[in-house]
Image: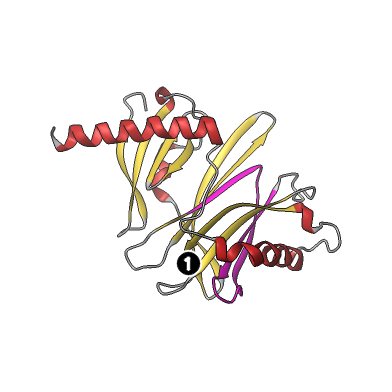
């Protein structure tokens, strides 16, 4: 089997698995290693951090903070041992009427807060992507629906001195604003629909490049 044919075969299998995973689980995130030693104190630390950073004091409670995703990595520097936690804030919408998602990066050993951010959106997923320099890049997907019309944007972030530094995701601009994105491992799928249910809805496939810190277009559908 030639390299091109083999790569197409691998991509097809990846897409099929992605459609299956999305249909069964909603594409929720997970950790990258055994987190048993962290769980006992992590939830309390996350809740404490969200309450400390909430501008509307005494409005949300601990039961309103729900952890959705967690990733280990080196987000603030190549040697850092950190955990990224994404949690929803219930019963307290953003002033724009959207839902709220808190993203917290903590040191694994001390549980000190490295960086904190909140994203207003109806749906948010976050993940980490490895870089060749040893510092992981953070990727956000933010999807919102207004008057029945859904839209989504993709953002990269790096952490520098405790601050979130946005990095433009320029490689997706050429596909326009009407695409929706689904990440599985180091492959990004661009689709024509906000819910991916069939391979025919895929418009492009991208592969993560650790050297450039960008997704590289591997395949564009003939209908695009």
Would residue 47 be seen by someone viewing this image from the given angle?
yes
- Does residue 59 appear to the left or right of 52 in the view shown? right
Q: Which quarter of the rendered picture does the N terminus lie within?
A: top left
- Measured from the top left, where is residue 56 in percent x and y? 82, 61
| Magenta segment, prevailing SS (helix, strand or loop) | strand
- Could you classify mark 1 by the number of other residues whose Cα lies within 10 Å: few (under 14), some (14-19), or many (20 or more)? many
Q: Residue furthest left?
A: 2
Secondary element under disc 1, as helix, strand or loop, is loop
> Could you tell me residue 86's position as x and y percent?
60, 55
| 49 or 167: nearer the viewer | 49
Residue at 85% x, 57% y is 59
Above or below 75: residue 210: above
The residue lying at 56 percent from left, 61 percent from top is 36
Q: Is residue 86 magenta?
A: no
Give the quarter of the image for residue 131: bottom left
The residue where tag 1 is placed is: 75
| Quadrant, the C terminus | top left
Total marks drawn?
1
Q: Is residue 25 left or right of residue 214?
A: right
Colour scheme of the picture: secondary structure
Residue drawn at 51 percent across, 28 percent down: 193
Q: Looking at the image, which residue is at 67% across and 63% down?
A: 46
Task: Tell whether position 105 is magenta.
Answer: yes
Magenta part of the chain: 100-127
Q: Farthest front residue?
A: 36
How far across and how far down the image is residue 89, in percent? Answer: 72, 52
Q: Residue furthest right?
A: 58
* Quarter holding residue 151: top right
Answer yes or no: is residue 191 visible: no
The x, y position of residue 159, in whole percent, is 50, 68
């Amino acid at each position: 089997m030639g390299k091109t044919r083999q790569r197409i075969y691998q991509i097809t299998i990846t897409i099929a698995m992605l459609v299956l995973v999305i249909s069964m689980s909603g594409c929720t995130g997970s950790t990258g290693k055994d987190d048993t030693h962290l769980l006992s104190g992590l939830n309390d630390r996350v809740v404490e951090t969200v309450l400390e950073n909430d501008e509307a004091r005494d409005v949300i409670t601990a039961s309103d903070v729900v952890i959705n995703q967690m990733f280990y990595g080196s987000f603030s520097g190549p040697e850092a041992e950190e955990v990224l936690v994404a949690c929803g804030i219930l019963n307290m919408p953003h002033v724009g009427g959207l839902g709220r998602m808190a993203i917290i990066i903590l040191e694994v050993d001390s549980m000190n807060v490295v960086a904190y951010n909140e994203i207003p959106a109806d749906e948010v997923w976050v993940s980490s992507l490895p870089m060749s320099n040893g510092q992981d890049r953070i990727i956000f997907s933010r999807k919102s629906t207004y008057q029945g019309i859904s839209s989504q944007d993709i953002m990269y972030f790096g952490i520098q001195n405790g601050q979130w530094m946005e990095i433009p995701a320029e490689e997706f601009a050429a596909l326009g604003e009407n695409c929706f994105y689904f990440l599985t491992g180091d492959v990004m799928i661009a689709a024509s629909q906000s819910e991916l249910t069939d391979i025919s809805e895929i418009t492009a496939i991208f592969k993560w490049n650790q050297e450039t810190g960008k997704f590289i277009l591997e395949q564009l559908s003939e209908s695009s």
